[in-house]
Image (cartoon, rainbow, N blue to C red):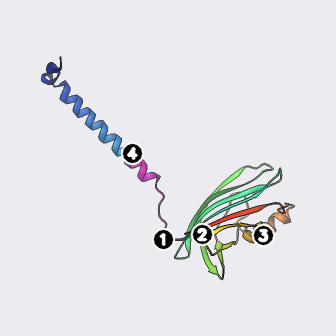
């Protein structure tokens, strides 16, 4: 039976088909990996990566979660989300930012939320040293704290965890 397949051309066609399928699978896998990789912003080379998780428990609480890449040239990018527990849902946030070092703090500008006024996160303040920190909302988000307090939010039992890494 095998001898007839070789002579009739069936086996060579199956081999060609198998090789073609393997090439397509490898090409698609490569394309998937290439499209999944994040693009490097202009300037590149992160000086800091900052992760922020700010949470206020309870029915009227909410939270903000951000990853920020601070590039050596004073620019960078961010991605994250925030939400209020009282309804309204979460908003996905991403974009470009700028930053500068002022003494022992990194001062970050340009982070915005789809669910808050454009000025709400101006500025974000985090330590300029690598490490994990537990802070108050007022220490990390001074303008957001003032805004939320002005509309009746109680942030007194909230906490912000900050990770500053290379």
Residue at image location 41% in from the left, 53% down from the top = 34
- Under tag 2, what secondary structure? strand
Tell me if mark 1 has few (under 14), some (14-19) or many (20+) residues whose alpha carbon lies within 10 angstroms of its own: some
Measured Cα–Cα span from mark 3 to mark 1: 30 Å
Which one is in front, 109 or 159?
Answer: 159
Mark whose residue sits in front, 4 or 2:
4
**Magenta-span inclusion, residue 38:** yes
Residue under circle 1? 45
Residue under circle 3? 138
Residue under circle 2? 97
Tell me if mark 4 has few (under 14), some (14-19) or many (20+) residues whose alpha carbon lies within 10 angstroms of its own: few
* Disc with the residue nearer the chain's start (4 vs 2): 4
Q: Tell me: 132 left or right of 135.
A: left
Measured Cα–Cα span from mark 2 to mark 1: 15 Å
- Under tag 4, what secondary structure? helix
Task: Provide residue 117's location: percent of width, then percent of height.
Answer: 73, 63
Residue under circle 4? 29
Residue at image location 73% in from the left, 57% down from the top = 63
Residue interval drawn in magenta: 30-43
């Amino acid at each position: 039976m095998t001898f007839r397949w070789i002579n009739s051309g069936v086996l060579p066609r199956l081999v060609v088909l198998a090789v073609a399928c393997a090439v397509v699978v490898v090409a698609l896998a490569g394309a998937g990996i290439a499209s999944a990789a994040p693009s490097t912003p202009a300037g590149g080379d992160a000086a800091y990566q900052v992760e922020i998780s700010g949470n206020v428990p309870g029915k009227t609480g909410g939270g903000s979660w951000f990853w920020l890449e601070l590039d050596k040239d004073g620019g960078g990018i961010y991605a994250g989300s925030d939400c209020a527990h009282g309804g309204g849902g979460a908003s996905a946030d991403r974009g470009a930012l700028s930053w500068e070092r002022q003494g022992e703090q990194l001062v970050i500008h340009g982070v915005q939320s789809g669910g808050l006024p454009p000025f709400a996160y101006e500025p974000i303040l985090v330590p300029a040293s690598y490490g994990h920190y537990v802070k108050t909302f007022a220490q990390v988000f001074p303008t957001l704290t003032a805004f939320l307090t002005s509309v009746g939010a109680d942030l007194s039992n909230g906490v912000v965890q900050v990770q500053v890494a290379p």
